[in-house]
Image: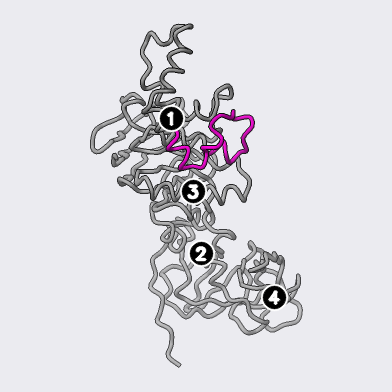
Amino acid sequence: MPELTFKNLSKSFGSHVVIDAFNATIEDGEFLVLLGPSGCGKSTLLRMIAGLSEITSGELLFDGDRANDWHPRQRGVAFVFQSYALYPHMTVRANIAFPLVMDAFKKWYHLPIVNAVARRRLMKSPDIAARTENIARQLELDSLLDRRPASLSGGQRQRVALARALVRNPSLYLLDEPLSNLDAKLRTQMRSEISALHHKVGKTFVYVTHDQVEAMTMATRIIVMNKGEVQQIDTPEGIYNNPANTFVARFVGAPPMNLVPVTRKGRRLATSNAQAWNHDGELPDGERLIFGVRPEKLQFLAWGQGRMPAQVAVVERLGAETVIGCRLVSDEHGGTTNLVENDLVFVRISGNPRTKINEQCSLDYHAEDVVWFDAHTQTRIPVRAAAPALV
């Protein structure tokens, strides 16, 4: 099982740079997720690992050995495509066994008459038959082995594609958005199955997705990408709680982290024309900052009970919890409120409160839950929150 190292890896199509100076290391046995919006270079990077796309510059190392020019067969990888890529004229059994059959193929087996006979003979060989049935049993496909892909559901086809990749016992698994074509319920089921599979086989998985839920629930580490550049490499917990910049803060989380441009006035903060409020933690140096806090860390309070006066703009009732979108206001003394021109500030609370649109409210937070960003560079500023006062 190889350790993968990327040294200033770049990929260009003509003058268009898709991946620029990518540096990272994928440890042996980890489940690494490449997360980012469409077009950020995730799938291109996966294809370069597999040897399906040429590397423009930089180095790709397998256990310290330069692999830029290795043939795909030399890399010992299994690739699960987004589109399943099953052979429609073959049974499930033949689709799963196909990589083993091709590994045993001789040059003369490609002759028209010999081809079909050779494939049937290889399919019946004890080793290939046993490995095919064993992996089908693991993925609960043993009752479908004689059916063709057209008669299978989307989830069953996805399991066939996984079985075809697993049957070769590769050292590295590459999965390119394999769940994007499934409905929500099936995606949840398949996430669990793939995670269980990773724990069972103990091999390295590199998984591409734009779905943050898949990344957060499956990964041991995540690489967040945007426009071909690495934004952050960290554990799911680290990326969620301590995003490296405002892009990561907005991209990870549903709703995403609230980001409010503020002006520092001593130990007070103000947004646009809003009333300033006191902040009980250590403030970073600088006048223009971005105040970041996750929706579940905000407190939704009655008017006048919190530091940030607001007005309810959106209420999303989700059963076990409710997401409330608020606009900060400039008048903290009641009466007519002037809405501040900024994005909605979201609060996620448990239960189903009796909250109405245009209701006046206030928001509050704990200093240790705030993440600060530089307004110019958009990068996180490490700040130590002040200890809470004793009462």
Q: Secondary structure at mark 4?
A: loop
What label sits on residue 193 in the rendered view?
3
Under mark 3, the amino acid is: Glu
Under mark 4, the amino acid is: Pro
Q: Tell me whether circle 4 and circle 1 mark residues in contact (CB < 8 Å).
A: no
Quadrant (top left, top right, bottom left, bottom right) of the N terminus:
top left
Compared with 48, 296 (above or below) is below
What label sits on residue 353 in the rendered view?
4
Q: Residue at x 59, y 30 (%)?
A: 147
Q: Tell me whether circle 1 and circle 3 mark residues in contact (CB < 8 Å).
A: no
Q: Earlier in the sequence, mark 4 or mark 3?
A: 3
Q: Secondary structure at mark 3?
A: helix
Span of residues in magenta: 132-159
Where is residue 181 drawn, in percent x and y?
A: 60, 40
Under mark 2, the amino acid is: Ile
Q: Earlier in the sequence, mark 1 or mark 3?
A: 1
56 or 69, nearer to the observer = 69
Under mark 1, the amino acid is: Ser
